[in-house]
Image (cartoon, grey):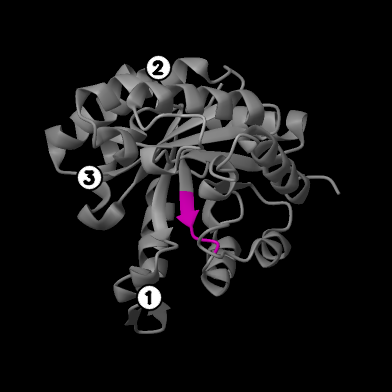
Amino acid sequence: MKVYEKLLKIQVSKNSRLCVGLDPRIELLPKPFKKKLRDLLKFLEIIIEITHPFACAYKINFAFFEQYGSKGLRLIESIKKTIPNDIITIADVKRSDIGSTSQAYAKSIYSHFGFHSATLNPYLGIDSLLPFFEYEDRLNFVLICTSNPGSADFQKIKVGDLFFFEIVLDKLATFYPSENLGLVVGATNTKEFKIVREKCQSNFILAPGIGAQGGNLSEILVTNQNFPLLVNVSRDIIFAGSNEDFETQILNKTKYYFEQLKIVK
């Protein structure tokens, strides 16, 4: 079964569009933990134990692990083993490169680590993404209009009547089927989200930027209607509490977003 179909089925069975972002920061660990990697692993295991009944996906941001070198990569392997098989895993790596380099990146994410999906950067062109799309059962989330403040520097440059991100989107949509092409559109970009959704109604949109970045969840949900959507929440869930009651705080915040992101209301 392709990841696109699996994700749709998981969302229906759980009535959830919630993706929990695992962006761990040792300095933000709650008081019961020491600022060490082994405690970070314990913390993430607790996060998964609390949130997995409500989540349909986990997004693991490689940068927060790679900073610790080989120990961080082993931590990714350990964490991934604790994620239930009925939940989609997304490698947040924003990869792409030329030829054999991109092939090696794709092999790392899909063959070695065994992720269902990955985030990709389209700036190098179609050929830089192709090795990832050769894994025909996977779902690749390509950056279209991101949630960071500087996204407008390039993505929103006007070329004639179109924004640059629209040109990128139109090009991608002609090359790759919707069941393999996911789109990253920040929830901080509500107008741009509407443009993308109107152009591509069958594609999954991964919407980060909710919570700490101030994305407008209610407007995103109204615009999206019932089209394929995955909303990522990271810091607002995993660092919901900083004291001994952190588990309760995380559970409460997870339930809050779960209620907002139900498919049927």
Q: Which is more foreground, mark 3 or mark 2?
A: 2
List the residue tagged with mark 2: 78
* Residue 156: numbered disc: 1
**Quarter-wise, where is residue 243 in the image?**
top right
Mark 3 vs mark 1: in front: 1
The reply to whether the magenta stretch includes residue 240 is: no
| Residue at (14% x, 43% y) in the render | 98
Residue in view at x 14 percent, y 38 percent? 99
What secondary structure predominates along the stretch shown in magenta? strand
Which label lies toward us, 1 or 2? 2
Amino acid type for the residue under numbered disc 3? Ser
> Which amino acid is tagged 2?
Ser
Asked if labels 2 and 1 touch by Cβ distance under 8 angstroms, the answer is: no
Q: Left or right: 246 with respect to 103?
A: right
Q: Is residue 72 visible?
A: yes
Q: Mark 1: few, some, or many residues within 10 Å (few <14, many ≥20)? A: some
Q: Earlier in the sequence, mark 3 or mark 1?
A: 3
Question: Quick check: 153 above or below 131?
Answer: below
Q: Residues within 10 Å of mark 2 (few under 14, many from 20)?
A: few
Residue 105 in percent (x, y) is at: 23, 32
Which residue lies under the disc numbered 3?
Answer: 128
Across and down, in percent, residue 248 comes to: 70, 36
Please report the residue visible at 30 percent of the width from the left and 51 percent of the height from the top: 121
Farthest residue to the right: give it.
Answer: 265
Is any part of residue 174 visible from this angle?
no
Which mark, by number, is residue 261? none
Residue 73, quarter of picture: top left
Locate residue 145, reporting x and y percent.
43, 63
Q: Which residues are magenta?
A: 183-187
Residue 119 appears left or right of 105: right
Q: CA distance from mark 3 to mark 1?
A: 22 Å
